[in-house]
Amino acid sequence: MSGRGAKVAARAAAGLGLTAVAAGALIWWGPAGLYLWLKAAHVIAIIAWMAGMLYLPRLFVYHSEVPIGSPQSETFKVMERRLLRAIINPAMIATWVLGLWLAWEGGFFRSGWLHAKLAFVLALSGLHGYFSAAVRAFAEDRNVRSSRHWRVVNEVPAVLMILIVILVVVKPF
C-alpha cells in the first residue's frame, strides 16, 4: 500500500473505531429513546448512501464520454474517489451496523419481510462493490464500459431502493 493509501486506511480505521466506541457507549448507557435516535441515524445513513449510489454512476456516464488524460477526466477521478471514500463507504457501513442493531433490538429477524429486505440490501452492497471497482478502473484509465452501460446501471440502485422501502413500510409478509 502506498504512503497515501496507508494514511487513508489509517484515517478510515480511526473513524470506524471512534464510531464503534461511541455506538457501544450509547448502547451500554441505554438512554431513553435510544432506539428512535439510532433509527433516525440509520435513515440518515441510508439517505447518504443512496445519494451517493445514485450520483456515482451518473459521474461514470460523463467520465466515460471524455478523453482519457483530459482535464475533465482527471476532475471526474477526484470527484468519484472523494464521493466513494468520504460519503458512500462510511454511509454503507453505518447503514449496515445500525440496521442490524435495530433489527436485533426490534426482534425482526424472524420476519419474512426483513429476510427479503436483507437480500435486496446485499444486492445493493454488491453493486456498491461493483462501483468501487469501477472507481479504481477509471482512476487507472482502464474503464471498458460505455456511457450506455452506466446509464442502465444508474437505474439499479433506484429499483433496489424502491423494493427495500416497500418491504420496510408495508411489511407484506
Image (spheres, rainbow, N blue to C red):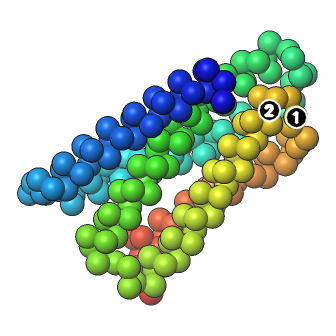
Whether residue 45 can be seen here: yes
Q: Secondary structure at mark 2?
A: helix
Q: Say what amino acid the circle numbered 1 marks.
A: Arg
Residue 45: % across, % down: 41, 47
Q: Is residue 135 above or below residue 111?
A: above
Residue furthest top as drawn? 71
Residue shown at the point (91%, 41%) measured from the top left = 144
How many C-alpha atoms fall within 10 Å of the one at disc 2: few (<14), some, or many (≥20)? many
Residue 54: % across, % down: 62, 45
How many C-alpha atoms fall within 10 Å of the one at disc 1: few (<14), some, or many (≥20)? few
Residue shown at the point (31%, 65%) measured from the top left = 102
Instruction: Judge by depth and name the residue closer to the eye, 105 or 161.
Output: 105
Is disc 1 in contact with disc 2, using a CB cutoff of under 8 Å?
A: yes
Residue shown at the point (41%, 49%) measured from the top left = 94
Residue shown at the point (87%, 34%) measured from the top left = 142
Point out which mark residue 142 bears: 1
Residue 124: % across, % down: 60, 59
* Separation of marks 1 and 2 at Cα, in angstroms: 6 Å
